[in-house]
Image: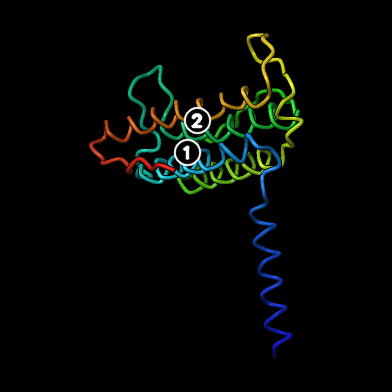
Amino acid sequence: MKNFITLIVFLSAVAAYAADPEPKSQYVKDILPVWEVSTQNALAVARAMPADLYDFKPSDSSMTFSEQIVHIAYTSLWLTQRFAADQVQEYSQPDFSGKSKEEVVAYLEGNLKKATELLVAMPEEKAQEEVKVFSGKMLKRYVALMFVQDHLANHRAKANLYIRMNDIKPPAYGFF
């Protein structure tokens, strides 16, 4: 019985480590608490809007609420792939027209999880490398990754405004 309990404790520890590995760079160690709260805030905003309002948009030139959430999901992963892992791909945001709220939220959750995994896996030497950003400037990779957080916050704020425009109390802002 004692060996069985030891085995269970060992396997639980291995599973916990595999699910939440230690960041490989100091930048990610420092920024991870902020990133995790930001992604949880994004998920809370996505969940706060009723399903029947996912097609809401405040003007003809605006994205729908669903498009805002899909944009957050897609670009958070796409930018992280580009700047943390050198996985440069053509920008091709998927069309989620006709998808349910549950499908959109699951897509957001999955992409944010993958982006987090890429951040955590980025080694220190890679974080310090310079990369060319969209303006053509060269920046340290970890500085370029700050844009991912900024972009997520920008579109999360827009989605949060859509909630307010429908007289719905938005989720409380979380801090780290």
Q: Nearer the viewer, mark 2 or mark 1?
A: 1
Circle 2: is it few (<14), some (14-19), or many (20+) Cα within 10 Å? many
Give the secondary structure at mark 2. helix
User: What residue occupies the far left of the structure in this picture?
Assistant: 167
Q: Position of 152 compared to 167: left or right?
A: right
Give the x, y percent position of residue 97: 51, 34
Residue at 45% over, 39% down: 42
Give the secondary structure at mark 1. helix
Tag of residue 64:
none
What distance separates the C-alpha of mark 2 from that of mark 1? 8 Å
Q: Which residue is mark 2?
A: 152
Q: In the rendered image, which quarter contains the N terminus?
A: bottom right
Give the x, y percent position of residue 122: 72, 37
Q: Are marks 2 and 1 in contact (CB under 8 Å)?
A: yes
User: What residue occupies the far bottom of the structure in this picture?
Assistant: 1
For badge 1, the amino acid type reads Ser
Residue at 71% over, 42% down: 24
For badge 2, the amino acid type reads Leu
Q: Which residue is mark 1?
A: 38
Q: Position of 69 compared to 95: left or right?
A: left
